[in-house]
Amino acid sequence: MKSQNLLAGALALAMLMGFAAAVNGQEQGPAARKALMTSNVQAFGAIQAIVGGEGGVADAVAHATTINDNAKRIPVVFDGGVGTGETRAKPEIWTDWDGFLAAAARLEEESAKLIEAANSGNLETLTAQFGALGKNACGACHNAYRGPRT
């Protein structure tokens, strides 16, 4: 019985490690980066609508959380020196990796503040933090690491 449990445990661990490797492999490259950024654009747009008077402040919590969760994934999605592909990602992402990671950390910090602002229920607080997120995190990163539309 012990050997069966040991074998089952080893098999489960091997499957888990394989799954983790597959997830990490899928999370890199141009398609994964585009999917993450598209998710951010959708969440940003939803919050922009709320700030504009469409919906309640509490509705922004889920969208701010999406941006925050995505911010935490940025280092993985962009890791590995994977080329730009058909995206607007600039080579500076990989030549200035530390700067890029700092920009991703700013997005994580500002989006955490956005969650707090949304949880406050106060539209003015949400609006102010939404502006700070756009300027200090999204805009700052895009100016340095995103190329122009072609």
Image (cartoon, helix red, strand yellow):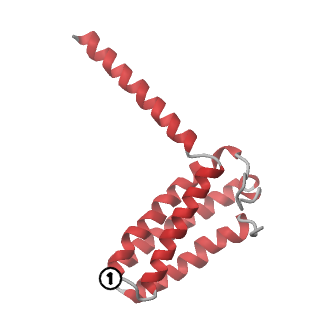
Assess disc 1: are there few (<14), some (14-19) or many (≥20) residues with their C-alpha within 10 Å of its C-alpha.
Answer: some
Instruction: Work out which residue is located at the far left of the displayed protein and give it.
Output: 1
Count of labels shown? 1
Depth order, front residue of 80/49: 49
Give residue 101's position: percent from left, percent from top.
62, 57
Give residue 62's position: percent from left, percent from top.
38, 68
Q: Secondary structure at mark 1?
A: loop
The quadrant the N terminus occupies is top left
At horizontal 44% and vertical 73% (from top left) the residue drawn is 113
At horizontal 76% and vertical 53% (from top left) the residue drawn is 95
Residue at label 1?
Answer: 121
The quadrant the C terminus occupies is bottom right
At horizontal 73% and vertical 48% (from top left) the residue drawn is 83
Q: Is residue 48 left or right of residue 60?
A: right
35 shown above or below 136: above
* Occupied quadrant, residue 102: bottom right
Query: What amino acid is found at the position of numbered circle 1 in the picture?
Result: Gly
